[in-house]
Image (tube, rainbow, N blue to C red):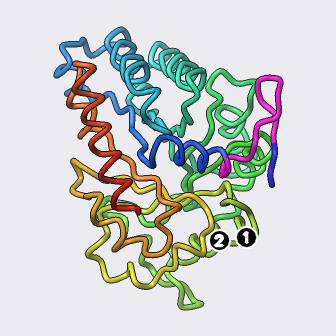
Amino acid sequence: MIMGTAGGGVLPAFGARLRAAQDRLGPLCVGIDPHPSLLTGWGLSDDAAGLESFALAVVETLAEQVAVFKPQSAFFERHGSRGIAVLERVIAAARAAGVIVLLDVKRGDLGSTMQGYADAYLDPASPLFCDAITVSPYLGFGSLAPAMDTAAANGCGVFVLGLTSNPEGPQVQHAVGPDGRTVARTIIDAVSLQNAGEKPMGCVGLVVGATIANRTEVDAYDFGAVNGPLLAPGIGTQGGRPEQLPAIFGAALRQVVPSVSREVLSAGPDAAALREAAGRLNAECWAALG
């Protein structure tokens, strides 16, 4: 089992921490995506102050109810250095509350640049230190080594883009290489190799959109072989539904981390309504995943 250090103590491997959190609180991951329209809908200003009020309210309201928060870095970055400072405080508040923080940054580069991203998000010395990040493998899977090595050293995780929920994804992900495998297949096989033998599951996750249930390629993939967490964005506004998850993931349902953002966040700013929306979707996902 991969171990790491953080905050002066030993941090258990990410896969084990995630499994324990989901067993306790349910499978749901709630995205913290401060769209300008959501800030306006909450009666907040579209600036750093409104951003902070929004994001910290989500953390405070739902911290005891969900296993994972997934802040979307772009909506903090758009406010410049003040937005990044808010992101630091949001990450710190969520982790202090015991919630796993998966930062959606989709970084993908090589060499020292990828190491720089790893140091920013996966090094306990960084103010942006979180439990896991999303990464893009499209400079080659090997380019992710600095992030995976840093994550492993610190008890963190990485989620690699595999089959994404956006309609443009198949143009790249379904392309077939000289060995007859699709690009998505090469990524899935590489993630599976990273997680081989890890228990209860590995620390390298795969992103598989919850909107692909009607695509013919679903039958071509054995997601159970990944032996790692399967982040399933796209539930709610993008059209995915909890009841579709079994059709996508088959026998790998135990590994699924269903992710929802606006369908929960739009229920705010009323705290009771936020909790009701998150509780309802968590229950629906738990039922669908058995």
Query: Looking at the image, is 168 positioned above or below residue 278?
Result: below
Q: x and y percent of residue 5 in the render?
A: 82, 34
Asked if residue 167 is positioned above or below residue 171 in the image, the reply reads above
Question: Could you tell me how far apart the alpha carbons at marks 2 and 1 are, in whole angstroms?
Answer: 6 Å
Q: Quadrant of the N terminus?
A: bottom right
Q: Position of residue 103 (x, y in %)?
A: 52, 37
**Residue assigned mark 1:** 196
Q: Vertical placement of 46 versus 16: above or below?
A: above
State which quadrant residue 42 falls in: top left
**Which of the 4 image quadrants contains residue 216?**
bottom left
The quarter in which the C terminus is drawn is bottom left
- 201 displayed left or right of 286: right
Residue 49 x/y as whole percent = 36, 8
- Magenta residues, start to end: 4-16
Asked if the residue at tag 1 contacts the one at tag 2, i.e. Cβ–Cβ closer than 8 Å, the answer is: yes
Say which residue label 2 marks.
192
Query: Helix, strand, or loop for circle 1?
Result: loop
